[in-house]
């Protein structure tokens, strides 16, 4: 009779469990993600995730045993919430990859209750498994400027979102994050005096922003609009900030920058905007202005993608539902704010 090396067999099984989490866990997934997951690999992970989501089957994914999953900053079990109500993918998906940090994110449309909604999604991959899933949903009926249907046509991102910046012109990770953070600093208690009183804001001349599917800059004025009418969304990014028009945003906290794509000059950010406690203010031109209805404390759970060129923001794409005032994020790394 042959003898077996029991110690050797136990060692092999132990290594297998260490790498894959557990025998049953490994068998429940479609296999681990490659350890050297590049841009194309990360984009494929998004497709795999969305396919599993629509199938209502988390078992299709290589999930870590201790995976963290949130919907609009609420911790849930994977398989709960939108996993039960998703009816299909929408017509729009814009993916942002960061192979250095092993993270990938996307903005796009999904279907629920017979209609499209907007979703931002971030996934973190470690040792071949998904360890973090952060999702934010803007659903029909949400407040503020929005146009879900326009994004689901589908919306087509401009080509320069996908350009490759020559290595010698690429900004460092820290430099890109500093520009994105400057946007939030200039927006918080916006007074028109520049970031921290410097007199400048980091925008290109053609900067444009889309929020929940609706343009909030460079919108053509109506033909019948009386001369001199205050029309915030008709302005460009720089003019809005220089006017101090966003004084209503009193605090931007929980700022995080988990996905940074140096090759394309993109920063994916999360933050929470607190507003509603101040509705009247003085603009930088000396005129007074009041925002009707901004007299109730509320917050916006913001996902923002910044396209940065030569140190200036050229495009901003945002998804942000209304949430409880001064909501705190369950995700570590953000500043708590005032």
Image (spheres, rainbow, N blue to C red):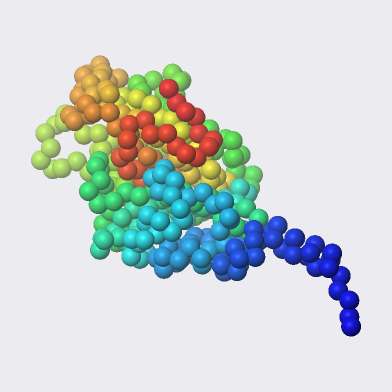
> In the figure, 143 relative to 327: above or below?
below
Q: Which of 216/73 is in front?
A: 73
The residue shown at (62%, 53%) is 126
| Outermost residue toward the top in this view | 286
* Residue 11 falls left or right of residue 111: right
* Vertical position of residue 335 compared to residue 20: above or below: above
Quadrant location of the N terminus? Answer: bottom right
Above or below, 41 relative to 148: below
Residue drawn where x is 32% and y is 49% of the image: 138
Image location (x, y in percent) of residue 45 = 53, 61
Q: Residue at x 39, y 40 (%)?
A: 302
**Front-most of residues 174 and 44:** 44
Q: Position of residue 105 (x, y in %)?
A: 48, 52
Considering every residue shown, the one lying at the far bottom of the view is: 1
Write the residue at 26% across / 18% down. Answer: 282
The location of residue 85, given as percent across then percent down, is 33, 60
* Residue 165 seen: no
Q: Where residue 337 sits in the image (x, y, percent)? A: 45, 26
Q: Is residue 70 visible?
A: yes
* Picture quarter with the C terminus: top left
> Total label count?
0
Q: Is residue 112 left or right of residue 333?
A: left
Q: Residue 300 versus residue 173: which sits nearer the camera?
A: 300
Instruction: Say which of 146 and 160 sits in front.
Output: 146
């Amino acid at each position: 009779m042959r003898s077996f090396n029991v110690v050797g067999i136990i060692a092999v099984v132990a290594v297998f469990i260490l790498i894959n989490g557990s025998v049953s866990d490994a068998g429940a997934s479609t296999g681990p993600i490659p350890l050297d997951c590049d841009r194309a690999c990360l984009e494929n992970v998004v497709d795999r995730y969305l396919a599993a989501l629509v199938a209502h089957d988390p078992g299709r994914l290589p999930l870590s045993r201790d995976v963290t999953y949130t919907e609009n900053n609420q911790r849930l079990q994977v398989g709960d919430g939108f996993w039960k109500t998703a009816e299909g993918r929408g017509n729009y998906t814009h993916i942002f990859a960061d192979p250095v940090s092993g993270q990938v994110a996307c903005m796009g449309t999904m279907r629920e209750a017979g209609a499209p909604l907007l979703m931002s999604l971030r996934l973190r991959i470690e040792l071949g498994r998904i360890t973090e899933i952060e999702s934010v949903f803007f659903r029909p009926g949400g407040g503020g400027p929005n146009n879900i249907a326009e994004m689901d046509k589908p919306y087509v991102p401009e080509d320069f979102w996908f350009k490759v910046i020559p290595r010698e012109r690429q900004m460092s990770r820290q430099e890109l994050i500093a520009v994105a953070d400057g946007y939030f600093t200039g927006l918080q208690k916006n007074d028109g005096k520049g970031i921290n009183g410097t007199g400048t804001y980091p925008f290109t001349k053609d900067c444009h922003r889309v929020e929940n599917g609706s343009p909030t800059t460079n919108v053509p004025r109506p033909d019948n609009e009386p001369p001199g009418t205050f029309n915030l969304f008709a302005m460009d990014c720089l003019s809005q900030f220089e006017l101090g028009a966003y004084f209503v945003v009193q605090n931007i906290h929980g700022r995080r920058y988990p996905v940074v794509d140096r090759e394309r000059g993109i920063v994916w950010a999360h933050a929470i905007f607190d507003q509603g406690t101040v509705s009247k203010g003085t603009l930088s031109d000396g005129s007074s202005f009041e925002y009707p209805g901004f007299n109730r404390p509320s917050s916006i759970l913001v996902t923002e993608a910044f396209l940065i060129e030569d140190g200036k923001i050229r495009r901003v794409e945002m998804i942000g539902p209304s949430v409880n005032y001064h909501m705190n994020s369950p995700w570590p790394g953000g500043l708590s704010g005032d």
